[in-house]
Image (spheres, rainbow, N blue to C red):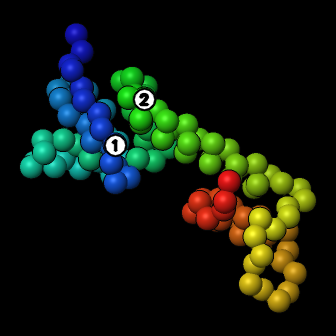
């Protein structure tokens, strides 16, 4: 079987059309909303959601590239979380020296918000 599902990504969302057979899966995605005007499900393009979608449909090259970008970002955040000796990834506007956990948290926030130059 298999319907001809259509996927698109824009504005931080994934749009999914033609979901007859996959309806229960798509409906169960976190924060999934059906947009009647465009007859498509709209879900946030998060790493978790893109990983879930790829289990039941092949992602388009553009969406797969975004999934990989988000995965790399998550890997950097996870690595920083476990960093025994964090170094500031930016000049933080604080007068005191930050504790290691504070430094890790600040670094993880910068990575998450993509505020660092590559």
Residue lying at 80% horizontally and 52% vertically, measured from the top left: 82
- Indicate the secondary structure of the residue bearing disc 1: strand
Quadrant showing the N terminus: top left
- How far from the left and from the top, in percent, is residue 117? 66, 59
Residue 48 shown left or right of residue 35 in the figure:
right
- Indicate the secondary structure of the residue bearing disc 2: helix
Residue lying at 18% horizontally and 47% vertically, measured from the top left: 34
Q: Quadrant of residue 99?
A: bottom right
Residue tagged by mark 2?
Answer: 61
Residue lying at 76% horizontally and 54% vertically, measured from the top left: 80
Residue farthest to the bottom?
A: 95
Residue farthest to the front?
A: 117
Tell me how far mark 1 sits from mark 2, CA to CA. Answer: 11 Å
Residues under numbered marks 1 and 2 in contact, where contact means CB atoms less than 8 Å apart:
no
Return the mark for residue 9.
1
Q: Is residue 44 in view from this perspective?
A: no
């Amino acid at each position: 079987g298999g319907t001809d599902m259509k996927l698109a990504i824009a504005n931080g969302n994934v749009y999914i059309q033609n979901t007859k057979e996959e309806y229960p899966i798509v409906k169960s995605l976190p924060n999934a909303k059906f947009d009647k005007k465009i007859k498509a499900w709209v879900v946030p393009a998060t790493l978790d959601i893109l990983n879930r979608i790829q289990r039941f449909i092949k992602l388009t090259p553009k969406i797969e590239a975004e999934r990989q970008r988000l995965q790399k970002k998550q890997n950097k955040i996870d690595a920083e979380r476990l960093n025994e000796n964090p170094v500031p990834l930016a000049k933080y506007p604080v007068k005191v020296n930050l504790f290691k956990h504070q430094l890790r948290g600040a670094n993880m926030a910068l990575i998450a918000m993509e505020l660092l130059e590559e």
